[in-house]
Image (cartoon, coloured by chain):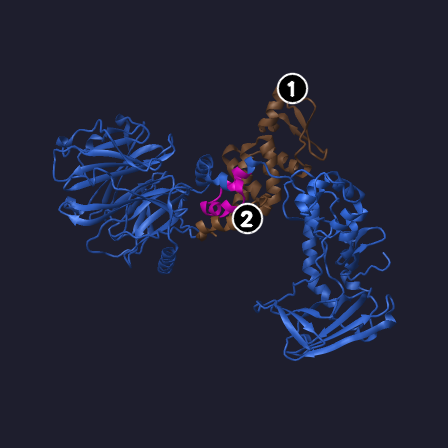
Chain colours: A blue, B brown
């Protein structure tokens, strides 16, 4: 080890390894000559004429010795390796003495390259913190100083001393003293190189001398400065630092030398224990540098190399990605070509829809802001308390012409919105239908149904929206009535995202308008077969007005609410009857799930049943309540509402499903409006 | 039926014993046992001993079925480092232990969800075959997601 320096930074010899490494490694050389013609042409881009005589080996070696390590790695073999720009690391076991018996072990590490044995060596000095005795010899007048740093100038060892730290009682200005040892290994040859004082620069930590003896210094705000002592000047290398409390110098500067070292040394499987210890050692680094000022701790050697790990199986990647939020997937479409294809594929979209949302069951709520009359969205976890999910924001960055959109339905991550314009004799007229995927902020504006815009004087459309998993398509169904005529049959048509047009369909089953007011039934539409059907309601609800259809688990459910002012009752509590149809499509299986009366609450509008059959209700002041019928209790989800004139129920609750639907068809939603919407939501967040 | 023991051998030639009725939670091992009775050592040339020890620990768990879901979650939570989880997921994939693979993948997904492009390439060992122009074009489409 002879002239190896315990201080650890003396790796200047490594600089020659890049060149010499190639000549000395017979194996590498061998593999290079195998497929010489192709490699030279493709990788190095030197023009050679094909079928000529081989270039002299000497020449090849010379050329290669000037190439970056990365190119050499590429040239090594002919076949196309999966390479990634990783660095090779080798984790060392801990020094034996360190883990052995000493009560308060402190370790000083040094690292260098040994030219004779062509080997990298780490030296470790382990000693007991309380009985330190070893101190390397230094120039006399520096030997008692603490703030020393070892560096190299040209071929000479240099030591520099810095003062001006608060420890010395000086607040500003800094002094540096730089010494070199002119003759190798001769302490008598220590010579002062320069001695400078900068009045206007706060003291920082000297990092290294460049070969022109310029000094690189890290300041206390992490700025990095290069001093030139000849001209008494300095320039900033980085000037973006900010003041920090508990500041600790972390900047490191050294020559960046490319080399093929460690290429042939085994795998890089991390040894857990060693990693842990490394962290410990790093924590001690600052203490050490004050007390001994000779140690720099560096244990990892990095070079660019071919990755040691094999690629992960596709199946695993697909599985992992399927559990990620849509936003991450959007971002990572540019990771690689295969990821883009994967994320755009129908199969993956379906898998993601299932896996991610099963892992992250959530709801969204659309509300009218009680203060500014604008609609906004928030996301809640599907947990017992319906907890607000502050990490997920939904931005609706296009506006309704009204206070808010009418939400037709939502399914598999796509929300179907409709908007109504001017008032006619019978109500509002349909203005627009939009399919919107909030998780990727894409929307698709639909044309109006054909029958709607076709001849009827007072058209009125009932819309339905679902996803058809057989055709993997989103469908909107529209029933258009003429409000002015009780005798015209409604016209039905279906729009599918894949065709992009409305197609008229027949209405089978439901009776024509003559039975319209005699009793209610539930009209059904099978989204796959596109056939209409009808369910009878439970007999005692067949004439009731205030009915809401929902779903509990896999069953259709029905909520009847009474107590509203229409019944002539004023504020005498509210009654809810919740029914489920136990057997699919069998009206004989309607069963009462629960029947409750709350004497202290004004009736509100039932919005939805949760899977535990809790009921979410919007009250007349826009408060939102969650009923639990088992415990006969309720909790407020929102309680910021105020009494309004002309109150109209606007709150909407549904499952929030993240999906990549509409990725290939929708328009991206404009950006500047989005910013506005964020601010709005944030403002509301504060008030809440 | 007597409790039969199987021996599994890792990539680095370490041997692990496990009772057969527990080992057959792995569909791969179950099929091997069915085919030839698997009397001798079952080599697992792609699984290192550290990972195999984890898999064995998982297979040996004594959880009531209703607590199993939580156990698996906790089991992977405790191995919070991406490389370890990837090794585990890969072993579970090879051995066809679906629950363990799903759980490990979910955990990885959770750890990487806010990563940048470079970070995710690094974590999942993906080569970047995109030119900066292509990358920008895709990025511009959904600027808000970055």
Vertical placement of residue A670 versus A503, above or below: below
Q: Residues within 10 Å of mark 1 (few under 14, many from 20)?
A: few
Magenta segment, principal secondary structure? Answer: helix
The image position of residue A272, as x and y in percent, is 68, 47
Subunit ID for the residue under disc 2: B
CA gap between label 1 and label 2 equals 51 Å
Name the mark on residue B36: 1
Q: Quadrant of residue A41?
A: top right
In the picture provided, is A547 more to the left or to the right than B111? left
Quadrant hosting residue A146: bottom right
Is residue A317 in sight in this rendering? yes
Residue A13 x %, y %? 79, 57
The answer to which quarter of the image holds residue A258 is bottom right
- Range of magenta residues: A317-339
Magenta segment includes A334: yes
The residue lying toward the viewer, choosing from B145 and A668, is: A668
Given residues A420 and A63, the one toward you in this image is A63
In the rendered structure, the answer to whether residue A288 lies left or right of residue A632 reads: right
Residue receiving disc 2: B131
């Amino acid at each position: 080890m002879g002239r190896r320096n315990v201080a650890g930074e003396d790796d200047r010899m490594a600089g020659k390894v890049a060149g010499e490494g190639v000549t000395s490694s017979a194996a590498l050389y061998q593999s290079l000559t195998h497929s010489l013609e192709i490699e030279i042409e493709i990788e190095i881009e030197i023009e050679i004429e094909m079928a000529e005589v081989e270039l002299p080996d000497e020449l090849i070696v010379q050329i290669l010795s000037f190439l970056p390590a990365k190119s050499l790695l590429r040239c090594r073999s002919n076949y196309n390796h999966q390479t990634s720009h990783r660095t090779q690391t080798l984790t060392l076991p801990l020094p034996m003495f360190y883990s052995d018996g000493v009560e308060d072990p402190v370790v000083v590490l040094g690292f260098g390259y040994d030219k004779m044995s062509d080997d990298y060596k780490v030296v470790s000095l382990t000693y007991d913190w309380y009985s330190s005795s070893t101190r390397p010899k230094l120039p006399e007048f520096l030997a008692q100083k603490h703030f020393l740093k070892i560096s190299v100038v040209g071929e000479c060892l240099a030591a520099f001393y810095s003062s001006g730290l608060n420890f010395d009682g000086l607040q500003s200005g800094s002094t540096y003293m730089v010494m070199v040892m002119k003759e190798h290994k001769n302490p008598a040859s220590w010579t002062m190189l320069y001695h400078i004082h900068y009045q206007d620069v706060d003291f920082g930590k000297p990092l290294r001398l460049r070969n022109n003896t310029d000094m690189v210094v890290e300041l206390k705000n992490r700025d990095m400065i290069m001093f030139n002592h000849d001209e008494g000047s300095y320039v900033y290398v980085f000037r973006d630092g900010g003041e920090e409390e508990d500041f600790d110098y972390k900047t490191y500067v050294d020559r960046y030398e490319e080399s093929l070292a460690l290429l042939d040394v085994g795998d890089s499987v991390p040894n857990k224990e060693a990693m842990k210890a490394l962290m410990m050692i790093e924590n001690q680094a600052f203490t050490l540098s004050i007390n001994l000022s000779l140690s720099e701790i560096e244990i990892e050697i990095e070079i660019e190399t071919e990755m040691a790990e094999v690629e992960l199986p596709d199946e695993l990647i697909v599985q992992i990605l399927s559990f990620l939020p849509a936003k991450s997937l959007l971002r990572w479409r540019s990771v690689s070509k295969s990821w883009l294809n994967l994320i755009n594929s129908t199969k993956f979209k379906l898998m993601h829809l299932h896996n991610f949302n099963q892992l992250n069951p959530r709801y969204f709520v659309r509300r009218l802001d009680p203060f500014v009359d604008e609609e906004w969205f928030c996301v809640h976890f599907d947990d017992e308390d319906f907890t607000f999910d502050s990490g997920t924001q939904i931005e609706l960055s296009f506006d309704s012409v009204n206070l808010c959109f009418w939400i037709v339905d939502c399914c598999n991550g796509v929300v179907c919105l409709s908007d109504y314009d001017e008032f006619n004799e019978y109500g509002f007229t349909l203005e627009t239908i939009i399919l919107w995927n909030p998780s990727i902020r894409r929307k698709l504006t639909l044309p109006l149904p054909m029958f709607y815009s076709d001849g009827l004087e007072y058209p009125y459309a009932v819309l339905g929206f679902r996803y058809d998993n057989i055709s993997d398509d989103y469908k909107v169904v529209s029933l258009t009535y003429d409000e002015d005529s009780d005798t015209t049959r409604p016209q039905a048509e279906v729009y599918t995202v894949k065709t992009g047009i409305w197609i008229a369909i027949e209405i089978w089953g439901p009776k024509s308008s003559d039975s319209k007011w005699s009793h209610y039934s539930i009209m059904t539409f099978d989204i796959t077969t596109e056939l209409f059907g009808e369910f009878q309601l439970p007999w005692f609800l067949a004439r009731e007005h205030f009915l809401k259809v929902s779903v509990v688990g896999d069953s259709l459910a029905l909520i009847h609410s009474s107590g509203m002012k229409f019944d002539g009752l004023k504020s005498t509590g509210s009654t809810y009857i919740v029914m489920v149809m136990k057997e699919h499509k069998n009206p004989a299986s309607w069963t009462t799930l629960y029947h409750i009366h709350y004497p202290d609450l004004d009736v509100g509008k039932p919005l939805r049943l949760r899977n535990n059959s809790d009921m979410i209700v919007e009250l007349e002041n826009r408060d939102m309540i969650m009923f639990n019928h088992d415990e006969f209790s309720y909790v407020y989800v929102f309680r910021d509402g105020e009494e309004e004139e002309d109150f109209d129920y606007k709150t909407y609750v549904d499952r929030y499903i993240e999906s990549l639907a509409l990725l290939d068809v929708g328009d991206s939603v404009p950006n500047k409006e989005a910013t506005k919407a964020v601010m709005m939501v944030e403002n509301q967040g504060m008030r809440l | 039926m007597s409790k039969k023991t199987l021996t599994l051998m890792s990539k680095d030639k370490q041997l692990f014993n496990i009772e057969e009725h527990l080992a057959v939670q792995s569909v791969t091992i179950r099929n091997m046992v069915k085919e030839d009775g698997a009397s001798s050592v079952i080599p697992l040339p792609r699984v290192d001993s550290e990972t195999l020890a984890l898999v064995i620990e998982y297979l040996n768990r004594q959880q009531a079925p209703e607590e199993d879901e939580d156990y698996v979650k906790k089991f992977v939570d405790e191995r919070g480092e991406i490389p370890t989880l990837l090794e585990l997921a890969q072993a579970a994939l090879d051995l066809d232990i679906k629950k363990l693979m799903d759980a490990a993948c979910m955990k990885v997904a959770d750890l990487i969800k806010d990563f940048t492009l470079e970070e995710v390439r690094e974590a999942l060992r993906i080569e970047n075959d995109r030119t900066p122009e292509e990358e920008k074009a895709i990025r511009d489409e959904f600027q808000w997601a970055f």
